[in-house]
Image (cartoon, rainbow, N blue to C red):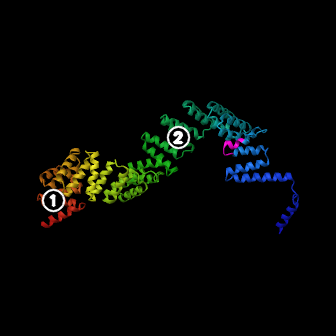
Amino acid sequence: MKKWIIVLAICYACPAWGLEISPEGKQEAALFNSFLEAVYVHRNNPQAYFEALKKTLALDPDSKYLRQLLVAAAPTPEQAEPYIDYITMGENTAEDYLAYASYNLKKQNSAQALDAYEKALALRPDDSILLQQYLLLLSTVDLDKTIAVLEKTANEQPAWTSLAYHQIGLLYLRRNQIEQALLYFDKSIQADPYNPQPHLIKAEVYEKTSQFFLMLHELEEVEKMGYADAEVYVRMAAIFTAVRDFPKAEAYFLKAVGQDPHHTAANYFLSLFAEQRGDFQGAINYLQASNDYSTNATRPLQVSFLQQKAGQNEQSLQTLEKAYKQFGDNVEIAFFYGLMLNDRRNYKQAARVFEKLLKSRPEYMEARLHYAYSLESLKKYKHMEEQLQILLEKQPNNASALNLLAYSLAERGERLDEAKELIVRAVAISPKEVAFIDTLGWVYIKQGELEKADAVFSSLPEDAVNANPEIAYHIGVLREKQGRQEESLRYLEKATPKWPAAQKIYQKIFRQK
């Protein structure tokens, strides 16, 4: 109840209650309401704000203030033209001069804009933002005058001394006057020893002039002040990396990821250091934490290699599979994914990957070779030979292609003379390649030239035979054909776990015993 009494008391106390408004009052109210409307639309629609101001000016055509607002709000200099005469309508404020300066900048009249800024500064000499705007414009047309203004500011305004000297140093850098720039950066530091900016710029100067230890000194000063961020730590780490002080480099990269856990460069180098120590999982973790892991196709490829080194074969394949789905057009990702699929004997999928890759990169002969290998494993011999023919036309001395075709023909027992010619060429090109020597021996076995086959296999070192189940299988077949059953069994036993064809011959010989 008390609230209603107070409201009534206020209403009855109001002198305008129930009185008629004069014409002048109505004009002022209309002007005020129109101005409020303009201010309201300004929040969301600059063009509507400009139009609303024009309507307001129609109610008060001689308003200098409204004309200044229209010049400031005009989307283009042409739209501001009808109102720019406000600058001659009596005494001007700093805001008037700033609006005039902005108009002249849009008209590319730098001299008039600078004059307006100087007049505004005369009215507001302590306005730091206004001073910065003026100096920024001045530096584009007259560096000497800019330096002079900054020198004056440094001497007259102690709060600005360090910053002014720093800006002078930057201007001298623009002129490539390095020594003069460094002199003013030192003045800036002397004026404010806790300002990190001149130290950072000096570090950049020393970096560009290859004075890395001086650069490191400046960055260490920034670190002492507590202003070092991830970028500063990475730059310091880079210096230690360059001088091969890897423990210190790693320590600073670790500081960088402490500040920014996803820093790309820091995580990359930490991954390298971890890999060198044999910490493959640590190396993987750093790469996966990097900002660019989901955008840089190289990163998942590196992770896949590291997973293989760590014995994480399934994870390695999954990493490449996911990367292939994301970066299907990346040549390296597609190539290594195809290789891994071949290695896992998923020849059908590998063939699809290589086929797609070759459509965009038909000149990629290494991919064509592995595509042919996939096709051979799928027993698509005609298509395989077509691929190898394309390859050998471009690279007639590609020993791996010659070997693959020779082996395929020998395995099928077809065109054995051609197979021998092909593999002889391959061995001539790479006489120490164990796989090629094995193919040559296999061709001789298929041709029934057992003595030649024996001589070929006898040239292989025993550790190469023990490490390769396929070679052991071929020698086992040779010994069986030579009637040397016990020797054959020993070789077939070596081949049996990983070479299924060896099992049949092994069981046959064993039953005959």
- Residue 79 is inside the magenta segment: yes
Mark 1 surroundings within 10 Å by alpha-carbon count, few (fewer than 14), some (14 through 19), many (20 or more):
many
Q: Quadrant of the C terminus?
A: bottom left
Q: On the picture, is 448 further left or further right than 333?
A: left
**As displayed, is residue 385 above or below residue 68?**
below
The residue singled out by tag 1 in the image is: 488
The answer to which quarter of the image holds residue 488 is bottom left
Task: Report the front residue among 78 and 112.
Answer: 78
The answer to which quarter of the image holds residue 326 is bottom left
The answer to which quarter of the image holds residue 223 is top right
Q: Residue furthest bottom?
A: 1
Task: Report the front residue among 234 and 86.
Answer: 86
Q: Secondary structure at mark 2?
A: helix
The residue singled out by tag 2 in the image is: 219
Q: On the picture, is 503 further left or further right than 280?
A: left
Task: Report the front residue among 261 and 76.
Answer: 76
In the rendered image, is residue 130 in sight? no
> Of the residues under marks 1 and 2, which one precedes in the sequence?
2
Q: Amino acid at mark 1?
A: Ser
Q: Residue at x 50, y 39 (%)?
A: 216
Q: Secondary structure at mark 1?
A: helix
Q: On the picture, is 357 further left or further right than 411?
A: right
Q: Amino acid at mark 2?
A: Leu
Q: Over which residues does the magenta segment extend?
A: 74-81
Q: Residue furthest left?
A: 483
Q: On the picture, is 2 further left or further right than 341?
A: right
Q: Are marks 1 and 2 in contact (CB under 8 Å)?
A: no
Disc 1 and disc 2: Cα gap in Å?
A: 71 Å
Return the x and y of residue 4 as percentages of the image width and height.
Answer: 83, 67
Q: Quadrant of the N terminus?
A: bottom right
